[in-house]
Image (cartoon, rainbow, N blue to C red):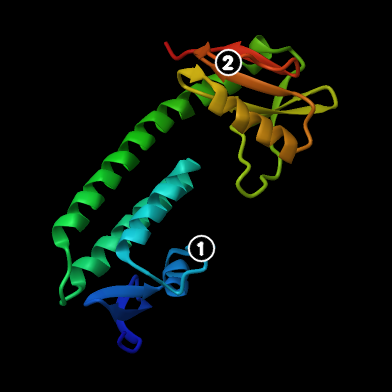
Amino acid sequence: MQALQNVFSFQERPVRVVVKGGEPWFVARDVCEVLEISKSFDDKLYVHVFDILSLAGEIISEYSRENKKKAWECMKLASTMYHSWKGPKNITTFNNLYGAMATHLTWISDISTNEFALQDLFKSRVKELISPEAEIVSVPRLKKHWPDSFVKLGDEVIPVEVKLDAFDNKALRQLMRYMKAYDAQRGLAVAGRLTVELPTNISFIELKIG
């Protein structure tokens, strides 16, 4: 393995690189600092561009507009550094992986954009769907625990999980995780249809766009 070299710059910030097996490996800490993320790549010291592409997928799995932007920054960083490398590299494998991940990000973004529309519809009709006393409230978000919204009903604050199509077992586990994180006694499941049996403390609201 060759010594560290400050040979890459991304958005005017240095990313140190070492050469292993003739390919560039980047200092994980530098990559995290450039992307302004707390990810540690499982405490790896050095990461390959394929690790950075995988990180984009991890980030987009918890969808938000900010995470969408950050995931594409990962893609741009990986592409910029790999294509700038003058030594040996497996460009065909990289292009295939990059294309697959780009397709995945686009697909997730399209679905989630429609989910945002359904979330907005729910918020606009919350009093009609639940109770005249119900209202959407803001609650400080806990890391990795981001319900789609919170409904205040009396003294109770209820987390809401919205799904564009089916509210399934995976969505149920997600909502129950939010309920535990926010110490909520009840939850609201909103979707076009229900495909899982809900516990008595979770209510289902059927809602579709159009």
Say which quadrant the C terminus sits in: top left
* Residue 39 drawn at (x, y percent): 51, 61
Q: Which residue is label 2 attached to?
A: 196
Residue at the bottom extreme of this rendering: 3
User: Which quarter of the rendering shows the N terminus?
Assistant: bottom left
Q: Secondary structure at mark 2?
A: loop
Q: Is residue 148 above or below residue 188?
A: below
Q: Position of residue 101 (x, y in %)?
A: 29, 46
Would residue 167 be found to the left or right of residue 130 on screen?
Answer: left
* Residue 183 visible in the snapshot: yes
Residue drawn at point x = 85 percent, y = 26 percent: 155
85 to 60, vertically: above or below: below
Q: Quadrant of residue 21?
A: bottom left
Image position, residue 30 (x, y; %): 43, 74
The answer to whether 199 is drawn above or below residue 35 in the figure is above
Query: How packed is label 1: few (under 14 Cα within 10 Å), some, or many (20 or more)?
Result: few
**Amino acid bearing label 1:** Asp
User: Which residue is located at x 52 percent, y 68 percent?
Assistant: 43
The residue singled out by tag 1 in the image is 42
Answer with left or right where residue 100 lies relative to residue 125.
left
Residue 203, given in percent of the width and then of the height, sits at 68, 15
Determine whether the residue tagged by mark 1 lies in a helix, strand or loop. loop
Which amino acid, by three-letter code, is at mark 2? Answer: Val
Front one among 106 and 23:
23
Spatial CA span between label 1 and label 2: 34 Å
The residue lying at 46 percent from left, 67 percent from top is 32
The structure residue drawn at horizontal position 56% and vertical position 23%, both measured from the top left corner, is: 169
